[in-house]
Image (cartoon, rainbow, N blue to C red):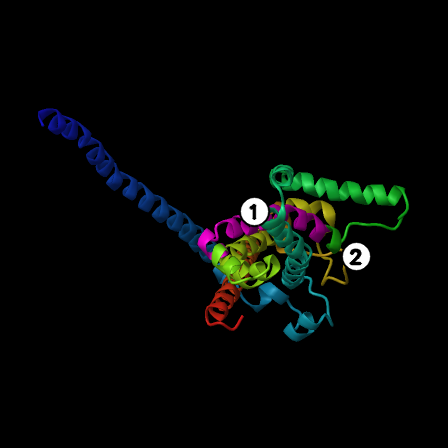
Amino acid sequence: MSRARASNGAARPAPRNRLRGLPLLRFASRFAAVALLGCLGALFAFLLFKGGPVLDRELLFGNTPSLDAILGLRPVWDGIWPALAGTLCLVLLTLCLALFPGIGCGVYLAEYAGPRAKALAGAAVDVLAGVPSIVMGLFGFTVILFLRRSFLPEANTCLFLASACLALLVLPVLIVSTREALEAVPRDLRLCAAALGLSRAARLRHVLLPVAARGIWSGVILALGRSAEDTAVIMLTGVVANAGLPAGLGAKFEALPFAIYYITAQYQSQEELARAFGASLVLLLLAGGLMLLASRLASGYRRRWAGGKA
């Protein structure tokens, strides 16, 4: 009995030590969350302080009437509306090019691929995720040079090339988020779907994808933010200053990240620098609005599926 008590007494301090460490871990995690929110709030407050006073119609359209500028009837020389429109076109085209391949590859790796295919494809995705954006832009520029010297002499950097390079950059985000979301579906749910006699395709469509929709949409939101803010890729693949509204997939374009860089690199007065801060605030609001829209769409999809209407 004494040995048992001694052994029990010797084994008790370990849980106490673990319990003593929990308040410190809880404090550290809360501090990290508060620090993150504080940094984000400080950044937004700084941009609001610097760019808020110039956030008006003139910043967007300059001296051009708003309706004429939106419809493209008159050019905008002193505003950021062409850059804003170019950024929207760039983001939407990037998602159109990356959404289906990214989610499809994630579904394949999670549900259909064998161990060897998972290892090879996973390594390829990791390598693609580690490619710097400037290298991807240089790759797109090299492709244009190759096309010019081979069978397409009229090839040039353009909106489509920039979107294609950005799509390659955001593909790993979509693939990894889709794969992890599907692999996180509980095994019991998979077994229940199989017990009901659903085929693999039916299980994927009616059970797995709706359950994993939140994780998949998280990847889409991250891809939205990445495609809206990247500058290095578009500098080498088609963005220029004073290009006006995008005239087509094969035309030059403007974008907010490059407009901010261009203004801050050669500003001559504090008014021009304030315009750069205003454009930065517009870019932040645009990215936040796109992410909020994607989040609302994801929430609506989950509510619809939970109500049995999917």
Q: Is residue 286 above or below residue 68?
A: above
User: Magenta stretch containing residue 52, yes or no?
Assistant: no
Q: Main secondary structure of the magenta part?
A: helix
Q: Is residue 268 visible?
A: no
Location of the N terminus by quadrant is top left
Span shown in magenta:
162-190
Q: Which residue is mark 2?
A: 250
Q: Residue at x 66, y 54 (%)?
A: 98
The CA distance from mark 2 to mark 1 is 31 Å
- Residue 120, compared with residue 310, is above or below; it is above
Q: For numbered disc 1, what is the local secondary structure?
A: helix
Residue 70, disc: none
x, y (%) of residue 76? 69, 65
Reading the image, the residue beneath label 1 is 176
Residue 37 point in image, percent of width and height: 39, 51
Secondary structure under the numbered disc 2 in the rendered image: loop
Q: Quadrant of the C terminus?
A: bottom right
- Residue visible at 21% across and 37% down? 20
Q: Residue at x 54, y 67 (%)?
A: 56
Q: Residue furthest left?
A: 2
Instruction: Identify the residue shown where x is 56% and y is 49%.
Output: 179
Q: Is residue 177 magenta?
A: yes
